[in-house]
Image (cartoon, grey):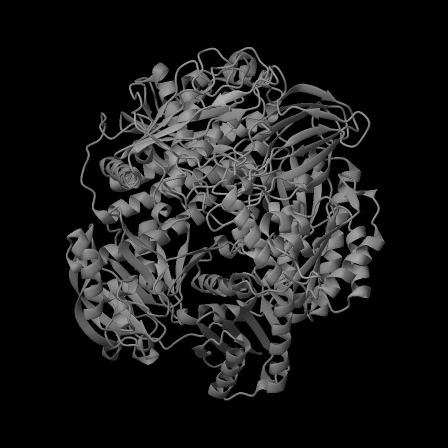
Amino acid sequence: MSELAARSIQSGLDKSSARSTGVGGDVERRWDRVDVDPITQQVIGGALHAIAAEMAELLYRMAYSSIMRESRDIGAGLVDFHGRQLCESDSTPMHCGSLPAYVKGIQRKHQGRYAPGDVVLHNHPYHGASHSPDYGVLIPIFSGEQHIGFAGCTGHMVDIGAASPGFSVDVPDFWAEGQVVNAIKIYDRGVRNDAVWSLIMDNVRTPEANTGDLEAMIACCRLGVQRFELLADRYGVDTVMSAAEDWMDYAERMMRSRIEALPDGIYQAPVGWLEDDGKNFGQPLRVATRVEVDGSDIYVDLTGSNDQVETGFNCPFEGSVLPTANFAVRALLLDEALPEGAGVPQNDGVFRPIHVIAPEGSIFNPEYPHGCEARFTQINRIPDQVLQALSGVRPEQVTAGNSANVSCFAYSGKGGQGADDYWVIIEVNEGSYGGRFGQDGIDAIDTLMANTRNNPVEELELSAPLLCERYELRDESPAAGRWRGGLGATKRWRFLEDTNISSTGDNRSDDPPGGIFGGHDGFGGSIVLNPGQPGEQVLPAKISNAQLKAGDRLEIRLVCGGGYGNPVERDPGAVFDDILDGLLSEEEARQHYGVVLLPDRSGIDSAATRSLREKLMEKLGKDPGAAG
Amino acid sequence: MLRAGIDIGGTFTDLVMWDDDGGQPVIHKLPSTPDDPAVAGIEGLKALLKNAGRDAAELDFLCHGTTVATNILLEKNGADVGMITTQGFRDVLHIGRKNRPLNFSHAQDVPRQSQPLVKRRNRIPVAERIRGPDGSVETPLDEQAVVRAVRALRERDVDAIAVCCLMSFLNPVHELRIREIVEREFPGAYLSVSHQVSPLYREYERFSTTALNAYVGPRTARYLDRFAASLGELGVNAGLNLMTSAGGMVPASEARQSPVSLLLSGPVGALILGIQVGRQVGHPSVITLDVGGTSADIGVAPDGDLRMKHLLDTRVGDYDAMMPMVDIDTIGAGGGSLAFIDEGGMFRVGPRSAGARPGPACYGQGGIEPTVTDAMVELGWFREIALEESGLTIDPQLARRAIQQHIAGPLGLEVTEAAAGIYRIAVNNMVEAIRVNSVSKGYDPRDFALVAEGGAGAAFAVYAARELAIPLVIVPVSPGVGAAAGLLCTDTKYEYRNTLWQKLDDADNPSVHQRIEASYIALERHALTQLKSSGVSEERTSLRFMAECRYAGQGYELTVEVPAPPVDESWIARVVEAFHRAHERAYLRRFEDKPVMIINVGLAAIGAVTALRSDTIAAGSQHPEPSARIDQRTVSFLDGHGSRPFEARFYRRAALKAGNVLAGPAVIEQPDTTTVLPPGSTARVDALGNLIITFVEPQDE
């Protein structure tokens, strides 16, 4: 079990290299900042929210690939010409807040040279893209002659012509991770550049899906432009943009007031470990996180994290690390499920008081041209570490350790039953949450920066030569705690044809999700080929283009979160429920929770439970480490 | 034919009686009896018959809209459900689509896990497996395991059993066998079988729908039995019909089997009335705005057609239900919505509501926070005595004090300006919801009429319409009982769907034609049998064939109406073209070169109800008679970003005659609603008594 996480350090951080996750309020304007009455303010806020929602809805429904439409691995919204977010869709958090970096990336080529009808496509991970499969589409918005902003969206393409289908971790540099589209106008003044379009689509394995997805992304942005223009016609561009700025200022005020409520100081998370870089197996990588609260500003310092690695297991700084730090702070301090966070829109204002320090040359700020596609697993550790760092000052808002990874698989083959030509399926597997104050950890669910949907088994089996033999909760008992940890899922595929697979992820085998305040640690995942059969083989979490045969089976067990609080304090009724639901044995109930059932198992033996719990507590008192 | 509609909502039970042979409709409204909604329904019907001087035996037709199934779900007091499911898939309901409801939250609840429809202990897996895409048996059913499972569930005393096998929509053989075993081993159990409830692919959604059906099934069935029995005791001979979420009527015997189809029964009636009124007025494309105390229901019916919700949106409360549902959107905006300043200084209205208790501040029932109703009182639209008949009195001073203290003071505004702001924000919330439900789905609001319904719809409709550039507002004769009136003009309708998964790129292949045709014919046969057994005569029967299509490779379907079989090359060409067009409308693009797939075939079998006779009211001149004018006052209307006082006339609706023209600023009172006519708008009373409101000029704010 990890020690009580937070401890304050006296010396301050070196903030000279800190980058705010936001752009800020003091910038050049191409509109007059006017006073907007509180009512119009509200009306325009509602309209902006509706525009982003509408853009995302269109994209989900029109998109081709399952990763966009089912997993919803997309983001959409409006930004001003600085890249400041005016509004953003409620889709996958990883995409939320990455648009500003894309804007910065395309501005360096096209600033001052946009025209109505332009459509810019961009995926350069060293110029703002979240990673290269996340295409960004941006369409400029004009007010008269003046370029004032963009309608933009980002979305994960199923294949972008990397060395192996879908993706792979073991690559020498970012060119091997797929074609780079470096801020190219695929439409110039309304005319499509067919040569570029063809070049892009001729170099991917799934041109049908990519074409459909890209068309959907363009339609999504066009809708955003249209809706913004209607709004500007109605209220005037000065009023709309001023109202948008007022909403940013509001969000900034709300975020700052929450940060200010925390005691100033530096809070350090215990060092975390990642299994490996996908090539040098057995060599764990270090994740170090400190958080400094300084008045109404907050700093997430990743100094001390591992040096960049030679594979694709690095994280683009601008497009991935900045939005992640932002998520980490916002989700903790302005929780959408609580009244304090519910009405605060996600825009540049929320980003402004949040700053990140990540030394160049580290895994969180790699140097060009290191590979950096497989970044989600490391990224997702940042919010988990921020929770651990701040657990001492926000004990009732943090969670115990979460799976905080992403297990992502690509399956592919060259034609087969029910499939078209070259098929590639990307499957993002879920994790689980740690226990929370007052609630158990959430089972089998995407955690933190991930929030995608699974593909229906019935859809995959109709589209590809796969058969799912099992998809349910893991057989092990959840990590004990007053509020227990979440359970991961287990999934077993049988391949009906020869199939290529790649994967990225982290089974947390070196560093399972920690229990907190006396809760037990969670436990890691595993990937096993042909379990229980001759030739059974344990595979690593990162697989680069392995060839499986027809009839092979692959069992994926996903990571389980840690427990929160002393298990002996768990409501005995909840323990009994877990026994009835097959999640816990009677023996475990006795051993971890001090709960004893009646001889006929019809209920709890209160007297025996009381006395056993007293004994366990006494033992804990003598040996405080025993709970974990 | 003597017809009655009974709409039982959470607060009020509304009834309407109509005689096809003449006379005015008879209306009755009484408080609902939530402990047993049938009590108010039966009491109301007794009163209705008495008021009309008719005998229960004379009733020929009875249709009921109910929130019973919905409330079981919202109050979470449904059945103990057991589930028999495919080995390896015990936790489909628990895992769901493995996404979180909220992005930025660690504290969120995930109801499918914390309050499951079927507890894990009662989800029993058995060995069996159907394989796609041909529906062959991969693993035979372990019948002994089924027997053990059913006996275990019987011993645990569950009320209902859901049967949920993977891929059952391709081949139901295992589900059917399990059904037989349950019927033999546990005859009293309420049965819900996935391929029968919703034979569509997507296992989580299908299992969830099936579990929901089992969850609400036993209590809904008991309620329907009780209601039918009480009707019998009352001497009613007409059969009981229920409004479904799909906007059709089914007999109680059918509703008992599939109560999950009643989950949206409540709000549909108002949309159906809106369509009926739109047709009468000659403006069939309607948007209905049905506003009550806490929420507003918005329905959009282009050309008077009921549009169904997209699969992605068919949720009820916290749970997914893959059932056809009329596309009605409910938002938390009504007369009782509260106005407040949040801690960051933003001025907000709703979705929090003052509810029935304490209600708006002006009612003096203890409410101190200002509501939208208080704002309208401050603006002067509701006279102190306007609600006398409902037993409520309005105290404008209380409204004023609440607005001053909570809004005007903190924002440094005049009270009237603050009131105008509250009202404007509330209207805007409705406007955004209408926009999302029309514009964003490819419909231009300028082609529609807005029909105001519910107690408060007519107080918002004119401003909302103007904001959306909707040219016409219709206020029906009795908008307050719109949902009950809608029940009188609802067709009998059965809807069936089945997953087919057929590409259409091989247009001249006879085996493809046969496959498609056979699937439609199977649905048709089933539907015609059902209609016949509900007593619908052949000449009233019509069939609508549907296909849910997408481009091969896409993930979500759009529904298109298709020609009746036979299926041949030209049939396929027409379907493909209809889909291209639907895609273009929804997503602004068509892809001629991409193959189209039929994912699901669908059929609506309709037994048409006799249209309601259109009765005219007494005609008058352009000028209302002096007796119709009941007051003249200085009241405030929106102006620019604030408000401005005007001299407004107050009229009594009942005294208006066909042909009367009323120019705003004016207020029209009737017992069940108040119509607000701002400056620049004009209401004309049509021959049937509807108010038809148009705008003199688009007022630019």
Foreground of the two, B240 or A48: A48
Q: Residue B691, relative to residue B48: is it above or below?
A: above
**Residue A608 position by quadrant:** bottom right
**Residue B481 position by quadrant:** bottom left
Is B633 left, or right, of B183 in this rendering? left
Q: Residue A260, relative to residue B198: is it above or below?
A: above
Is B341 left, or right, of A626 in this rendering? left
Residue B224 position, x and y percent, is 62, 73
**Residue A128 position by quadrant:** top left
Residue B396 position, x and y percent, is 21, 70
The reply to whether residue A335 is visible in this rendering is: yes
On the rendered image, what quadrant is the C terminus of chain A found in?
A: top right
Foreground of the two, A198 or A464: A464
Residue A196 position, x and y percent, is 50, 15
Query: How many marks on residues?
Result: 0
Q: Residue B408, relative to residue A175: is it above or below?
A: below
Is A466 left, or right, of B652 in this rendering? right
The reply to whether residue B695 is visible in this rendering is: no
Q: Residue B42, relative to residue A580: is it above or below?
A: below
Residue B476 position, x and y percent, is 40, 68
Tell me which residue sits at (47%, 81%) in the image.
B23
